[in-house]
Amino acid sequence: MCINMDEIFQILHECHLNDDKCEKTSDIKETNFIEDVKRNIEKLFAEVQCNIGSVEYANLNKMLALCHLKIGNEFEAIFHLIESHAVILRQQILHRSVKTEMRESILNTQQSSGLKASYVGFNINDTNRVDNLKAKLFDLPKEWYMIQVTGQYRSPGDIFKHNRTKLHAMHEMHITILPTGTKETEPFCITLPKPKLDSSYDICYEIQKLLSNNRSELEATYANNELYWKMRERQNISMKTAIQALEYTWLREWRILFIADPINKPDIVAATVQMIDKLISDNKNSKKITERSKWLLRKVALSACFLTREEIARAVKYVLPDYNKLADNIILSIFGKLPCIEELKNAIRKTLILVIDEHMDYIPFESMEILKCHPVTRFPSLHIAYALFKEHESTMENGCKIIYTKNDMGTCIVNPSGNLTKMEKRMRLFIEYWLPDWKSWYNVEPQEGIFEDALVNRDILMYNGHGNGIQYLPGERIERLRVRSIVLLFGCSSVKLLTVGGRYPPYGIPNQYLIASSPCVLGMLWEVTDADTDKMTTNFISNWIPSPLNRPWADVDINMWCAGTLKFLKNRKSSQNVSTESEMLRAIAKSKDICSQYMTAAAIVVRGLPVKLI
């Protein structure tokens, strides 16, 4: 990964020009900021002895992004923010590609291959990098709504002294809008400052502290059931409080950037957009208002049903700081149209593609109230999202990976460790009723060949056991496969990115499934309990995967099923047509409501492509 030194010094030179400007305007804070960035870059290069390493590469790109934002080069800044994501994972894909080529050369036989290396390479010196970025976004489905969340640059002292036990604190957050499938809207970035709280409450610290104690609290022995359930309730309240603070204190009005565009109710959308456009065009200075500002004003108007009146006014005035009269007119017009816009609160929306900084991956953004019941999936990097899309492009329709439904399309591995007997009994009742033709293994440690066959030759693998199953098929083996299966890992911390220590970003098994081109992986961000997870699993599967039966799982007496007996509710007639939600992400979003514990629902995430059964 070569770095263009001329570019860095040119930016630093422009920063010095800004320094002169700052001195003239007595803007001391601006001067200090530029000097801090300059000092950080110089210190980082003093630490680097030869080729720049992955951690330095990521942080240098964040520094360059800050410089570009300060001197007004937003597209360049966005390129560097994107480039800072998933550096080690992209390196690993490149290394895997080299290893595959070597095996093919030595063994003279074709090897299984995952993501294409050329889509994830490091092209920082490419003179057409911004145009190439725009072309890549245009190539992605227009049915996606993509945003990127990037944490602030951390200083070299912080990087080199970082230890495994240190908890991250709140910080600046870069939210980058990455419009896909269109040339009408260009990418742009909004940087949210660390919130100024009246107390010492820190959202990041509280979530990490809760998660670090989660396992020990769940496994502890309690004198009675009441004490156990009080602990669970305290956990639920702590996590819910943190997510509410994230949504309403940290993101504030800009939480609307996370909500995807409405698909239905086109009349309300068109009327609202027309109202904003007319107010802008009627202003004598309308030609000076940028497309970025127009997009944001439309977004505020269309999302006003999620905001307070104070937040609407604050957002509009942020977008139009120099147009007070126009801002007031737009604010009043949105207020007047609120009864109509309120109908968009329950609109069906596009899929949110959430590209998350690895250092912020532990935060359950999907649990924000504004995203409730809406389809969301995660990626570590735009480059990875693009590579996986291109890998499955021939089977993509309307933004979803298409899977053809068959009675025997999946494999189930249940309780392979043999010590989850209650869970096994519940899941066996469900699988034998709803998925009778699936290949199922109960209370048996699967041989590597069985696990591989499920990943390579079946459309869906459902794993119900401890962890994520790498005790039966190592991640190194998974990387070398060409995984066809959608992987459903209903185990504790099954898709958690683990802190590996030192200066390195967290890493986990979902990365290895991505390398192997698996369409998507569902799992848990932290430890969960089996009964609540089983309820969510059966609700999700029965609402997503059609069954040859004509009686829905909703007719089952869940309390009796949890106790190990399959019985149907009395006084409920059998349904002739069992309706299902064909899009996996929408089915998951709806199934979270079945969870008794907020901590269980918040733990559930998907990484990878949207999937649809037909």
Image (cartoon, helix red, strand yellow):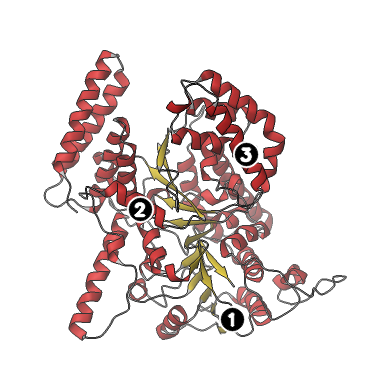
Instruction: Give how far across and how far down residue 186 sits, in percent.
Output: 41, 43
Amino acid tagged 3:
Phe
- Position of 579 with respect to 108 (left or right) is right
Q: Quadrant of the C terminus?
A: bottom right
**How far is mark 1 from mark 2, CA to CA?**
37 Å
Residue depicted at 59% across the width and 57% down the height: 600
The part of the image, by quadrant, that contains residue 586 is bottom right
Residue position marked by numbered label 2 in the rendering: 135
**How far is mark 2 from mark 3, CA to CA?**
33 Å
Q: Estimate how packed mark 2 is, as few (under 14), some (14 to 19) or many (20 or more) residues with alpha carbons within 10 Å.
A: some
Name which of mark 2 and mark 3 comes first in the sequence: 2
Q: Estimate how packed mark 3 is, as few (under 14), some (14 to 19) or many (20 or more) residues with alpha carbons within 10 Å.
A: many
Amino acid tagged 2:
Ala
Instruction: Give how far across and how far down residue 50 sits, in percent.
Output: 11, 51
**How far is mark 1 from mark 3, CA to CA?**
40 Å
Residue depicted at 40% across the width and 39% down the height: 189
Question: 366 or 342, which lies in front?
Answer: 342
Image position of 173 with respect to 286: above or below: below
Indicate which disc residue 406 carries: 1
Indicate which disc residue 306 carries: 3
